[in-house]
Image (cartoon, rainbow, N blue to C red):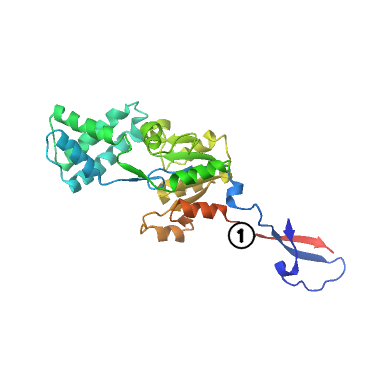
Amino acid sequence: MYNTSPQACGILGGCREKSPLILCLRRSSSSMSLLSKLRLITVDVTGTLLAYKGQLGDYYCMAAKSAGKPCPDYQRMHEGFKLAYTEMARQYPCFGFAAKMPNIDWWRMCVKDSFVKAGYEYDEETFEKIFKRIYSAFGSSAPYSVFPDAQPFMRWLRGKGLNVGIVSNAEYRYKDVILPALGLNQGSEWDFGVFSGVVGVEKPDPHIYKIALEMAGNVAPEEALHIGDSMRKDYVPARSIGMHALLLDRFKTADAESWRKSGATVLPDLVATQEWLSKNLKDEPVAAEQNV
């Protein structure tokens, strides 16, 4: 439907008979929300749906104490883990997918190197006790909390008939154990997941988003929206293949202002995202030439 009234387009001057008249047409805003144009919404996990509880050192400390060892220094442990994880991800990306490395072995190497880089070394028996405690903890819901708006938002999307997918640099335990334990279940909150440790591709490689489009039934990029909290891993690669994208700034990061300046939509949470998706798009002027 189009609105051609003088009030909508401005008073048109007189014109000679049969002269071309440029009419300012405006599409009706009914049913023109972005949501009505979408078939698929994909979401990141950490920082978008979940947050970590406590500090990394809390879990490493508890594990060391359970093996009769003193609690390691939190800061050294944090730095050691960052270095070890970065090296493992570079040497064996996607949690060892290409090398066909068992998930537990990938993490065993990472955790052991984390302790070494932090200045702690244990005999094999002691380390194995510590490692099993850490591996078990991070394979459960214990270190995570789900944002209160996550489940209602995902259910709302699915209630609107949209496909909801998860795109995450994570291993299989997120899909099989962690998300379900936190009340985010496949079939009620999300339809499918693209996890780097399962598919062998990780963000920011745009191909992980192409996989999501394929898994959703070959949805066109312009009919999909990705929601995440990283410009580099979420926004840029999703936009590069033609998807819509937005960023969440749950923790008021210093980078958010630069995100906005670059043209990204940045919202504080999923409640605001739901409101944003439901809003009608701004009227778009359309020029049409007509003989009168």
Residue at 43%, 38% (x, y): give it: 184
Residue at 32%, 29% (x, y): give it: 103
The residue that label 1 is drawn on is 282
Depicted 173 relative to depicted 267: above or below: above
- Asked if one can make out residue 37 in the rendered structure from this viewpoint, the answer is yes
Q: Nearer the viewer, residue 258 or 47?
A: 47
Residue at 18%, 41% (x, y): give it: 61
- Asked if one can make out residue 241 in the rendered structure from this viewpoint, the answer is no
Q: Position of residue 226 (x, y in %)?
A: 49, 46
Q: Position of residue 229 (x, y in %)?
A: 41, 50
Q: Which residue type does callout 1 highlight?
A: Lys
Residue at 32%, 26% (x, y): give it: 102
Depicted 217 relative to depicted 160: above or below: above
Check the image and name the residue furthest to the right. 17
> For mark 1, does the 10 Å Cα neighbourhood hold few (<14), some (14 to 19), or many (20 or more) residues?
few
Q: Nearer the viewer, residue 94 or 225?
A: 225
Depicted 250 relative to depicted 291: above or below: above
Direction from residue 20 to residue 246 in the image, left or right: left
